[in-house]
Amino acid sequence: MTMTDVAFYLLSGFAIWTGWRVFRVDSMIRATFLLLLSFTSVGLIGLLLSASYLGAATIFMMAVEMMVMGLFMVMFMMNPAGLNPMMMVHQHRLSIVAGLLIFAAMTGAVLLTPLPSDPVAADRPVLRDLGIELLGDSMLIFETAGVTLLATMLGAVVLSSRRGRFGPTDAGSVPPGLSAGGPPAGRQPKGGGSHGGHGGHGGHGGQGGKGAHDGHGGGGSHGGHGKNGGDGNHGGHGG
Amino acid sequence: MSLIVGLPALLALLLIGLWAAAALDTAIGRLIVGRPVGMAATDPLRAVVADYLRQRTDTEAPDHLNWLLAPGYYFLLAVVGLALVPFAPDQSLIALDTSVVLWGAAEAVVVVAVFLHGWSPNAPFPLIGAYRYVAIGLPVMLLSMFVLIAASIPAQSLDLRAVVESQRGLWNVIRQPLGLPLFLAVVMSLTLRGPFDYADSADLAGGTSAEDGGPRWIAWQTARAAMLVAACAIAATAFLGGYLGPVLPGWLWLSLKTLAVMVAVVLLTHLVPRMPVAQMLTLIWIVLLPIAFLDLLIAGLGAL
Amino acid sequence: MTLSAILIVSAALFGIGLYGALSQKSFVMLMMGLELMLNGSLLATMGFWSLALGGAPKGQLLAIIIMAVMAIELAIGFALIVAVYRKRQADVTEALETLAR
């Protein structure tokens, strides 16, 4: 049992345990960063497998993605800090059975098929191979991925833009009531129908809505975070 | 590089660097406002002890685990960054052929660490500081990606050791002049300083550190100083030729260059004012990012 | 660190991700489940590339495509969540029970 084997078992155990804890913790921010830990473990296993670029890039991408996911968690989940116990599940037993069934089926398939064995040579220039492949034989795939990411960026901005194709997207929407079925919460502004300014992040909104923060790094633009408190129906804000 | 030689060397560089960072911050801060410099070299050491003995404060329903560990995450990332820096030809504590990408990953996780530090106290000003920092820190990381890729192009490798070796003829700061200024902006953002200090700034009464009592405060400041050492060492490695130099031994050159970059960063910290967040975002996305592309273009044309 | 061990680990991650995707009511948690499933498949790809393909570059390419798919799915997913919330105040899957506007 070499050092790499020990490291592999520790990392994979950690990846599975954190993956499971994602759905058990009450605090949504902790769930997000537990998923980041799971991805980091998989990235480190990649480094052990001499996929040096893939491992490091996994950690890189996932850190950025989980940061954005954390912001969305706080936006959309009712219990971001886990101050109350929470379990928002449906068809729970079905899901457990489905998960276990898939795991059993795949494990069975893995154990029963004769897997090929052709380990990567220790001195193979893995990175150079990847570079030549990406920009040589598979240039078309690479370029297509680039165009797809561009389409994603445009799509994300368009989908989450306040100025929809048939009128302002939140013209008919009202925030839910503070009590079930009660009048809408929040201040009702006189013009426009947008949600009343929840304080939000003083640093962002205070500049008369100039912030053009409609994109974040890591290979894809995610529709904005936070709400520019009460700037109504200004066009062209990507959220 | 073996662990027996490398680890003590790393710790020595880190400890001396920490003290130098704190002393520089104090000294330059006092010089600029016209106060006598006094005992700037030992004041930080006294502050460490004094802050550690101060009262520990707490807030209502904080995230205890992450509040305790956030300075630890930050410090760990600084140690990882410093471990990637080569001290001598082909000698770095973490020998990886994609060390540039791993440093980029460390930068990305810094944003997560600062966010957790602001999220955990369950208080308004730290939370605002955390959110502002995420908005600024993520695009600044893009800048660092592009300038480091530009620095890797002459080396034809993503390995920091190869990047240093490729500077034997000419340092990257001369053949890619836009790289180092942009990377200094990245360093300032990583260490929450000066014009990029949106997380811990005075206009938020301390931002993510607003609710930190004595021991937590000094832990966070220590981690910040460690990240300054690590990021400046990476800057010296990628742009100023690392351990290359005529007469003195390699590690001494590396230390001197790191110190020079640290002085530059601390000067910029105290001299350059901070813009409102929206203007800074516009600046990064519309001005700095195209300049980073230009830097990459220059590097690419130079390699043709 | 045999190929079977890696594939069993990735099957476990996939199973947990499937449990999450099927059981969570909230959209954002559902996406976390999807991310875990892609995590499992990324690990399987890296394992196959390293231990069964002898380092053929197309294996790494597939892993990079999976990472691109993760990014794209996250971006469009969040944009759709924002759009659906703006239109119908829906942040759980139960709220989207009808196709009616």
Image (cartoon, coloured by chain):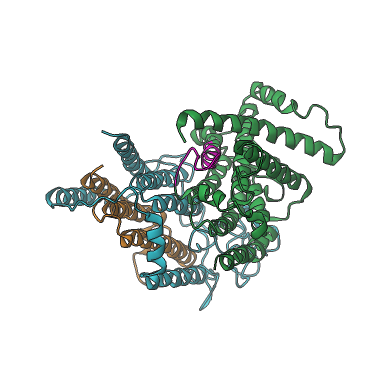
Of the chain colours in the picture, the one used for chain A is cyan
Which secondary structure type mostly characterizes the magenta part of the structure? Answer: loop
Magenta residue span: B76-96
Percent from the top left, x then y, of residue B209? 64, 38
Tell me what residue is drawn at x 38 percent, y 60 percent: A130
Q: Which chain is orange?
A: C
Return the residue found at the far bottom: A166
Tell me what residue is drawn at x 30 percent, y 55 percent: C55
Query: Does the rendering let one see residue B130?
Result: no
Query: Does the rendering let one see residue B175?
Result: yes
Q: Is residue B219 left or right of residue C56?
A: right
Q: Is residue C22 left or right of residue B146?
A: left
A217 or C83, which is in the foreground? A217
Percent from the top left, x then y, of residue A94? 22, 51
Q: Quadrant of residue B57?
A: top right
Of the chain colours in the picture, the one used for chain B is green
Q: Quadrant of residue B299?
A: bottom right
Q: Quadrant of residue B29?
A: top right
